[in-house]
Amino acid sequence: MTETAAPANGLTLPTLRSVAESALLIIVIYVIMAAVYAWVQPSALSQYSIESLFNNSLPLMLAAAGATFVILQGGFDLSLAGVISLSNVIVAVWPMEGPGGAAVNLAMVLAVGLAVGAVNGFVVAYLRIQSIAATLATMIVCQGIALLILKAPGGYVSDFMAYDLTQSIAGGIPVALVVAALTMAFWSVYRRTNSGRALLAVGQDEHAAALSGIDVERTRFFSFVWAGAFYGLAGYMLAAQTSTGNPNAGDPFLLLTFAAVALGGTSFAGGRGGVTASLFGAATLMLMQKVLFAVGVSSFYTGVIQGAIMILAVLFSVGVNAIVNRRRAS
């Protein structure tokens, strides 16, 4: 069933079908790359390789999901690197054993992410400070706190996190894949709510959104709050994957996260795109690294090839949107 959003003051929100179509390109790219990877690397279909692929991809996927919430409303969030680093060291310095302990650690990092997100949201939405400046400041603060907690890579995580959260359940389904699927399901539900429609509306035209009765400040505030929660979860899963902590763990995610969002086709102008496409964009970036390594491409060229493919994907997405808009206008 296709959900049609009601227009408000000339503002037409994307339908559920249009969201699926916007993610179609990156899904096709991912499937093609997965087929190539399986062809050049026979062991790619082993249980261990599949688990490793999803475990390596999940932190970036979660970071991209969080960043998408902010970008959809026309903002920018640099604090992701700081939140991931801080969450990572918190788990590694104060590990708690067993499923209950892992749940407590998860609550700790979610609280950190939500708190940082709330600060970002308040400063940007209500004090009207530019999002780049505000989130740069919170990123620096979080990185400083992370260094105070753990001055060098070290620490450890519980056995439950290191093993149970990085293995498979229910006869071979990686836990990382389950987390990614739950994130997609959450977005699928969220975008149908009034808050989800408001997020897209503010990104398209905040003045039209305000005239239609949408609380623009509240929408912006909660976009940063949701983003912070996903950054905290990304740091948590990164700690489970590496079994250790690093006060600079979030640094490599800063550029890769925005690359993943762009590769997924989400518009940095806001209002177009979605979390599902960003998740596949992040997964594609990580899979691309494995494919290039498998075919013998030097790591020096990896960034160049990733950037070229990302540019082509973005240009294709822009072209498709331009054609669709022209047809609607006619």
Image (cartoon, rainbow, N blue to C red):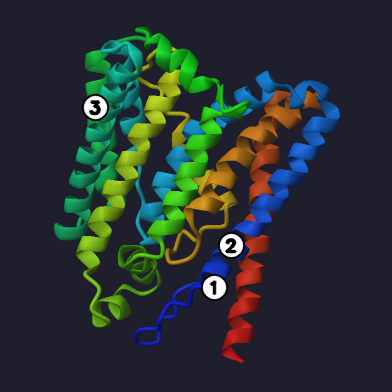
Q: Which residue is pictured at 38% across the width and 16% down the height?
A: 246
Choose the circle earlier in sequence order: 3 or 1: 1
Residue 245 is situated, as x and y percent measured from the top left of the image, at 37, 14
User: Circle 2 sits in a helix, a strand or a loop, which is it?
Assistant: helix
Q: Which residue is pictured at 41% across the width and 62% down the height?
A: 191
Q: Quadrant of the N terminus?
A: bottom right
Give the CA distance from mark 3 to mark 2.
34 Å
Give the CA distance from mark 3 to mark 1.
38 Å
Q: Which residue is pictured at 22% across the width and 51% down the height?
A: 121
Residue 116 is situated, as x and y percent measured from the top left of the image, at 22, 39
Residue 271 is situated, as x and y percent measured from the top left of the image, at 43, 67
Within 10 Å of the Cα at label 2, are there few (<14), some (14-19), or many (20+) other Cα atoms? some
User: Looking at the rendered structure, which numbered label has been put on residue 81?
Assistant: none
- Under mark 1, the amino acid is Thr
Q: Nearer the viewer, residue 221 or 172?
A: 172
The residue where tag 2 is placed is: 20
Instruction: Decide if residue 303 is on the left or right side of residue 224.
Output: right
Instruction: Decide if residue 228 is on the left or right side of residue 282.
Output: left
Choose the circle earlier in sequence order: 2 or 1: 1
Q: Nearer the viewer, residue 163 or 301?
A: 163
Instruction: Decide if residue 49 is on the left or right side of residue 189.
Output: right
The residue where tag 1 is placed is: 2
Residue 190 sits in quarter: bottom left
The answer to whether the residue labelled 3 contacts the one labelled 1, judged by CB atoms less than 8 Å apart, is: no
Q: Determine the residue located farthest toward the left in the rendered image.
A: 127
Choose the circle earlier in sequence order: 3 or 2: 2
User: Looking at the rendered structure, which numbered label has been put on residue 108?
Assistant: 3
- Under mark 3, the amino acid is Met
Give the CA distance from mark 2 to mark 1.
10 Å
Q: From the viewer's perspective, is the residue at label 3 or at label 1 nearer?
A: 1
